[in-house]
Amino acid sequence: MRVAYVCGDPGVPVFGSKGASVHVQAVLRVLVARGAEVHVLAPRMGGPAPDDLRKLRLHALPQIPKGGPAEREQAARDSDSAVPAILSELAATVPLDLVYERYSLWGRSATAWAAGMRVPCVLEVNAPLVDEQAAHRTLVGRPAAEEVAVAALSAATASVCVSDEVAVWARTRSQRPDRVHVVANGVDVANITPSPVPVAPSGARPITIGFVGTLKPWHGVETLVDALAQLDGADPGGHRLLLVGDGPEAPALRARAADLGVAHHVEFAGVVAPADVPAQLHRMDIAVAPYPALKPFYFSPLKVYEYLAAGLPVVASRVGQVRRALDDGRLGVLVEPGSSAALATAIAALSADADRRSKLRSAARAAAVQQHSWDSVVDRVLSLVAQELDWSRVAV
């Protein structure tokens, strides 16, 4: 099986450590493990490939240099325009069996090429990028970006969206809304496993509360710091907070912890390589996803699936895909978004109940393995283009 994987987003380095990069690597890892010859097209590789991805064939697209918004948008369009020539060169020797593109703001060429050449094409949509860029950054050419989204979504054999909310956005733009499907994120269940150490007994001190992710406003980590202060007020020294990741909110979070008198109970571990995340998860007793009440909430958080795979009891906000990932509370504790009091109460209850934490460990791990492995995610994606694939050439 020969696959062209296109990641035209300059904000997603293929071999980076951010969540989007982890997602890219996970899909590539499954394809490579199944014997596929995978060609990666991207403007930003983000360093050397991990050892298990050394077989990838890398094709550099023109980079998007720093500059003003209009200049960067044009550079991104120019970078995308280089895709068809590379795909045609690859197909001139041995046919491509599949084009797999991670939707980017200006990426339309890969899906158009695939449609024209009658090659099955998957478009993976992780966010409503047009709305996101306009709301949180700067988007000069919004009409043009909307046109790109319509073209890419309409040309793809199948568009796979990480949440129902993203799928709604995609269907309103695709000329073939019946080709838009929901396939949530997954997790590497072979690499992320429960700690070999038994759960901490009831009354153990301190209990380590953990968070993994980029420290950005929409992750709600300030609510978690507030909850820690409330926990410390009721049980001084009974809890500590481990924050794995970095981001623009880090200085404000450090200041908030200091103002609340809990800075000495907070560890900022910073950015860690994806391979080092499991060790950090093993340091945690309870994992938290404290999202605020965002509308719309369209994320499919990798961190929640990683928490489940690690067998961690999870406390998370009752929002969007998070609620579904935790099976409406069967696999964790759901709380009111933005409420530090509700968060503190849930964490305190779990801290005092080792038996419940042990049961959640078993249930969470089982759900991750049975429903959310990256192998099962790729299976679901490939099933959507099964009729178009030449299965005599697909080793799966």
Image (cartoon, rainbow, N blue to C red):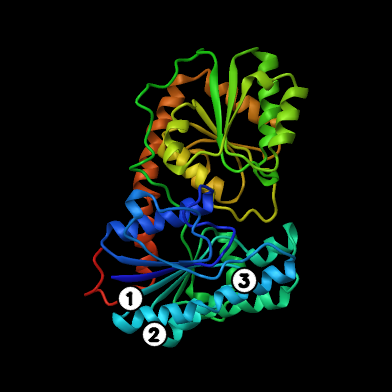
Q: Amino acid at mark 3?
A: Ala
What residue sits right under mark 3 in the picture? Answer: 76
Q: Where is residue 272 shown, x and y percent of the image?
A: 51, 38
Real-space CA distance between mark 3 and mark 1, rounded to the nearest whole angstrom: 26 Å
Q: x and y percent of residue 317 in the render?
A: 62, 40
- On residue 269, the disc is none
Name the residue type under label 2: Arg
Residue 376 at x, y = what percent?
35, 55
Residue at horizontal 73%, vertical 74%?
A: 141
Give SS at disc 3. helix
Compared with 202, 59 (above or below) is: below
Q: CA distance from mark 2 to mark 1?
A: 10 Å
Residue reaching furthest left?
A: 392
**Residue found at the far right of this picture:** 259
Say which quarter of the image contains residue 292. top right
Q: Is residue 228 left or right of residue 31?
A: right
SS for tag 2? Answer: loop
**Which mark identifies residue 118?**
2
Q: Which mark is residue 97?
A: 1
Is 177 above or below relative to 307?
Answer: below
Sequence-wise, the earlier of marks 3 and 1 is 3
Q: Nearer the viewer, mark 3 or mark 2?
A: 3
Is disc 3 in contact with disc 1, using a CB cutoff of under 8 Å?
Answer: no
Percent of width and height locating residue 138:
75, 63
Which of marks 2 and 3 precedes in the sequence?
3
Q: Nearer the viewer, mark 3 or mark 1?
A: 3
Q: Quadrant of the C terminus?
A: bottom left
Q: Quadrant of residue 242?
A: top right
Structural crowding at the residue carrying mark 1, measured as other residues with C-alpha within 10 Å and reported as few (<14), some (14–19) or many (≥20): many
Residue 344 in sight from this viewpoint: yes
Disc on the earlier residue, 2 or 1: 1
The amino acid sitting under disc 1 is Asp
